[in-house]
Image (cartoon, helix red, strand yellow):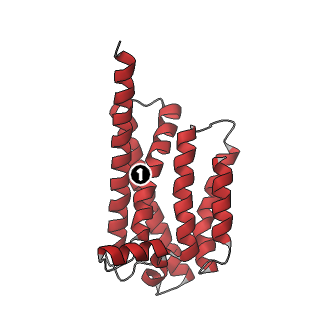
Amino acid sequence: MVLGAYALVWIGTAINPRDWLVWGLENILVVVFAGILVATYRRFAFSNLSYLLIALFLSLHAIGTHTGYANSPIGDWLKEMLGLRRNPYDRIIHFGFGLLLAYPFRELLVRTGNLGGWAANWLPVSLILGASVGFEVMESLVAEIVSPGTGPAWLGAQGDEWDMQFDLAAALLGALIGMLLTYWRERAVQKRCVSP
């Protein structure tokens, strides 16, 4: 059901995107990632919660690829409402990357690496930050290949020379919040199990 709902969002955002080249490039990793999830489903099925979180993140990403992150209507509305200098939708996506994907990363690490304790909550944060850095570097390289000399404009940095650092900070903050929520949830479950 979650996959079907996401497929509808993806198909809807594939109809007449603002920039076909950007849409295509932004969706290469999505197609690869979805293919990996489908191909490994029998060997490793995530929990329903993880699939829901993954689908929510991918849906937010699909909306951004359709409109262009710097031109997202939701971001324009927030920009106007909060008096910001730039459209913040890309930062929302980076924050969502950390917040929504830290738990699935944790689930993968706990079940395949038999992790527990602090490592089970710290390593997903580290993975989110490492993946974010890798993505930012890859995105910069692709931008320079596709549109030499216009990388910041193509990437939607909106004249913000600290765009990459703020994007990384947003992902880190999202991951930290995600793991804190997970920690509190597990503590509450443990207390309920111990209580008579």
Position of 149 with respect to 146 (left or right) is left
| Residue 2, x across and y down, in percent | 63, 48
- Please give the name of the residue rendered at 45% of the width and 84% of the height, measured from the top-left corner: 153
Residue, disc 1: 99
Most foreground residue, 7 or 175: 7
Most foreground residue, 17 or 107: 17
The answer to whether any part of residue 35 appears in the image is no
From the viewer's perspective, is residue 36 above or below residue 166? above
- Please give the name of the residue rendered at 34% of the width and 22% of the height, measured from the top-left corner: 191
Quadrant in the picture for residue 171: bottom left
From the viewer's perspective, is residue 96 above or below residue 162? above
- Please give the name of the residue rendered at 36% of the width and 41% of the height, measured from the top-left corner: 181
Residue occupying the far top of the picture: 196
| Residue 164, x across and y down, in percent | 37, 69
From the viewer's perspective, is residue 189 above or below residue 48? above
The answer to whether any part of residue 191 appears in the image is yes
Number of marks in picture: 1
Quadrant in the picture for residue 106: top left
Q: Secondary structure at mark 1?
A: helix
Q: Amino acid at mark 1?
A: Leu
From the viewer's perspective, is residue 189 above or below residue 126? above
Residue occupying the far front of the picture: 81
Position of 56 with respect to 14 (left or right) is left
Local packing at callout 1 (Cα closer than 10 Å; few below 14, some 14-19, many 20+) is many
Q: In which quadrant will I find the C terminus?
A: top left
Most foreground residue, 160 or 130: 160
| Residue 183, x across and y down, in percent | 35, 36
Quadrant in the picture for residue 124: top left
- Please give the name of the residue rendered at 48% of the width and 44% of the height, measured from the top-left corner: 105
